[in-house]
Image (cartoon, rainbow, N blue to C red):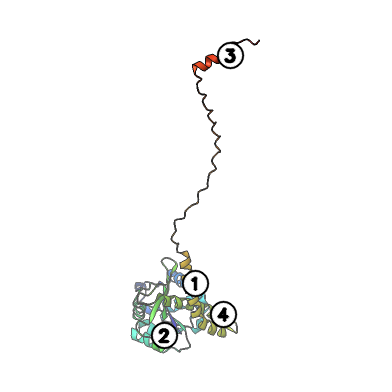
Amino acid sequence: MMKFLILARHGTAQDKLKTTDDFERALTTKGKAESEFAGKRLKEMQVMPDLVMSSPATRALSTAIAICNKINYPQNKIISVSPLYEGKLREIVSLLRSINNSVTSVMLVGHNPMFDQLYAYLCERPSVSIKKGEVAALILNISSWSELNKNTGRYYFYISQKTNQTKPTMKNKKSKSRKKDLKEQIAVLIYAFAKSMTNTDSKKIQKAVKSASKLLAKAILKSMKSGKKKSEKPVKKKQTVARKRTSKPKSKPKPQNKPKQKPIPAATRVSQQSLAETPTV
């Protein structure tokens, strides 16, 4: 079973020069709007983390609350974790490894440069720099949080404030199989749908979906292959077009030439004439 990690950086906060205490810096109006937008996009994608942990800094905790309000995650279940404020990379990795294995997806709300370092540790490519109020998500190819290690993560999605869009899933350049990427992405979407169900049979459905998602992915890939074959244009053979025989108008029969009369000899002509002139008795 895969695990999922969502890294949400806090929204735009008050200027450092206007306050002496960095820990107490609050979100600006822009920062609140950024946090609400991130939560709205997560809700549209049906992303519901099992566990939300936040830096205790005011700007980070306010961002976590704004996001959780949008995705209907209870505020009282947000866990404030001090290493997410000033901790080092090894402390964050150790924190993630200690998570109960029953938890499938985790959202961390915190700061940079820590989040960029954590992302680079788990997934070298493609490189991502998480801006204020933006969210980066990873698919972790582990079955237990204790297995978390370098390069065990793969890019899933990124919510950008600049374009107000969610960047599509990108292929990890280190991935050997594009098919495997697609199978995992389909499985994630199906699992997210099952996770959103609230009826009493949701657990049974989730188990069935988990076992069937890979088979469904294979079927989709198979249909995609057959679709490509059909779409390929066959080599056109030169077809001999049968020309229609145009019925030629019947030609009129040529008049038969009458045989030319042979000229009668002069002697014969005289005798005939003389016979004609001879009176009858």
Q: Which residue is mark 2?
A: 142
Q: CA distance from mark 2 to mark 4?
A: 24 Å
Q: Which residue is mark 4?
A: 197
Q: Residue at coordinates 47% horizontally, 64% vertically from top-left? A: 231
Earlier in the chain: of badge 1 and badge 2, it is 2
Q: Amino acid at mark 2?
A: Ile
* Residues at marks 3 and 1 touching, judged by CB atoms closer than 8 Å: no
* Helix, strand or loop at mark 4: loop
Foreground tag (1 vs 4): 1
Can residue 88 be seen from the camera position used here?
no
Q: CA distance from mark 1 to mark 4?
A: 28 Å
Which of 234 and 31 lies nearest the eye of the viewer?
234
The percent coordinates of residue 279 (x first, y second) are 63, 10
* Helix, strand or loop at mark 2: loop
* Residues at marks 2 and 4 touching, judged by CB atoms closer than 8 Å: no
- Quadrant housing the C terminus: top right
Earlier in the chain: of badge 2 and badge 3, it is 2
* Residues at marks 2 and 3 touching, judged by CB atoms closer than 8 Å: no
The percent coordinates of residue 222 (x first, y second) are 48, 74
Q: CA distance from mark 3 to mark 1?
A: 111 Å
Residue 279 appears left or right of 181: right
Q: CA distance from mark 2 to mark 3?
A: 139 Å
Q: Residue at coordinates 53% horizontally, 85% vertically from top-left? A: 207
Q: Amino acid at mark 1?
A: Ser
Q: Which residue is mark 1?
A: 223
Foreground tag (3 vs 1): 3
Q: Which residue is mark 3?
A: 275
Structural crowding at the residue carrying mark 2, measured as other residues with C-alpha within 10 Å and reported as few (<14), some (14–19) or many (≥20): some
